[in-house]
Image: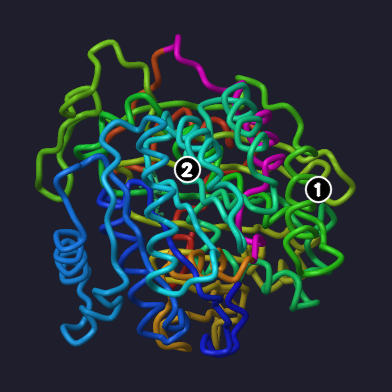
Amino acid sequence: MTDGSPLQSYQVEPHLFVVLGGTGDLARRKLVPALRRLASLGVLGSRRAILAVARDADLDDLGFREWVREALRESGAPEEEIDRLGDARLFYEGLPKGDRGDYARLARRVREIEQQCELPGNRVFYMALPPRVFPEVVEGLAETDLNEGPGWTRLVVEKPFGRDLESARRLNETIHRHFDESQVYRIDHYLGKETVQNLLVFRFANALFESQWNRERIEEVQITVSEDLGIGSRAGYYDGSGALRDMIQNHMAQLLSLVGMEVPGRFDAESVRQEKIKLLRSVSPIEGENVVRARYTGGEVDGRQVPGYMDEPGVDPRSTTETYVALALGIDNWRWQGVPFYLRTGKRLDRRLTQIAVRFREPPVCMFESMGACETHSNVLLLTLQPDEGFALVVDVKVPGEPFELRRIPLDFFYKQAFEGIPDAYQTLLLDVLTGDQTLFVHAEEAEASWDLFGPLLDPDSTPQKYTPGSWGPVEADALLGRRGHRWLDPVDHPDLGEDS
Ligand code: BG6
């Protein structure tokens, strides 16, 4: 985990980075650009190589080197950095069949490259692949003894990790037959986001907040991950997934855990991950009446006509997939008993925003009533993870002069103003894989605890509610909070962004 010390102090040992699915979209958009940035920062050292593995039997090392250059140009890398990864360290191997013979060839190629580049046998196997092939790849690597090399061997598993509790368990079993948990890095790219990591610092480095972080002081917590785009051309994946699997079970479960967990004894992978698991296990089972599933209809957004979910190309006409989920949950422990946590996420909503809003309890009495200014408000802490990374603590102040009037203003901080640039999540996570730090990766038990909690909410037999594109979601989601005397704190509640409410 990048802890603020200069990246140059990181020691990456000589290694071979094998990307299975090495010419796919993820490799092109995220992995290769992130490895290039790390190389440019000088943290990867010179004894390293990348081996891309994919089905295409016609591609070779030269073709892959050209592919890398194109990917880097597309990613906006400066021209003088395009060759940073070094042609002589880039290799390609086609596995057209994915059978035992193919894996035996892969094993030979791995050893050849290690000899040629004088590498000691430290290996990363990154599965940038569709999840259905994870088990066969794990078996293929193990059959050819690639699960344990002469140096360290690390396996990176992309999301989604299973489709439900059962499949996540099966996948964990397959992986654990051949790899020790200490070798496994389950990726949730939210954990690589600088602002998500900052949640831990915010809570545990600032005694001021930690002492308020409980049911005595907090009225409610709202976590919003909204996106303005629809599913675009991703129906092939999305229609079989939906918002619950795509966002709630992983990214939002991570945000929930980091906001709600107890203080870890130490800042290391074991302690942090155990606290997150404990938190997920403390959440009370979520009743169906506390969940709203919905999907967007067609309509006009910013003067442009956009299709409804059912009219997106590739969506099954019988689909019951949701593009929006809102839910209310409670955490059954001393710290949080009685405090509702509201989660909502959706596509084609008002704007792109990832925000955690912590609303504190209102003052017990209004002592300004006699002055004609009775309306005091709750303090709200807004932690914005994207797009305007930063935080704001909303407080009441007196408007100067007469009449006596209160106004809410934010005490705020924006990353953009305080720091230069925020590293991309994949850059952070790949560096952690290479340095062997599992803190920001999902533990086997954590993946299962999350499925255990959210899996029962999957509801393929019921038709989701509807919401208008460009809105904040369906009316049913407002009612979900209304029943408890609460309402969604839309960003207009941030006084910088709109009228005081
Ligand atoms: C991905 C989901 O994991 O996260 C996408 O599959 C979603 O559907 C994306 O759009 C959101 O990530 P970010 O970093 O843009 O918030």
Residue 17, image x and y in percent? Answer: 43, 62
Give the residue number, with chain letter if any, for mark 1: 336
Residue 308, image x and y in percent? Answer: 21, 29
Q: Residues within 10 Å of mark 2 (few under 14, many from 20)?
A: some
Q: Residue at x 46, y 53 (%)?
A: 490
- Region rendered in magenta: 437-462
Structure colour scheme = rainbow
Indicate left or right for 398 with 103 as reference.
Answer: right
Q: Residue at x 14, y 59 (%)?
A: 63
Q: Residue at x 67, y 73 (%)?
A: 202
Residue 165, image x and y in percent? Answer: 62, 25
Quarter of the figure with the N terminus: bottom right
Secondary element at tag 1: loop
Numbered marks: total: 2
Secondary element at tag 2: loop
Q: Where is 82 relative to 301, above or below?
A: below
Which numbered disc covers residue 459? Answer: none
Indicate left or right for 334 with 232 as reference.
Answer: right
Residue 323, image x and y in percent? Answer: 37, 32
Q: Where is 322 relative to 247, above or below?
A: above
- Residue found at the very far left of the displayed protein: 304
Give the residue number, with chain letter if any, for mark 2: 159
In this rendering, does residue 186 appear at all? yes
User: What's the residue type where badge 2 is placed?
Assistant: Lys
Q: Which of the two residues, 229 or 112, is positioned nearer the viewer here? A: 112
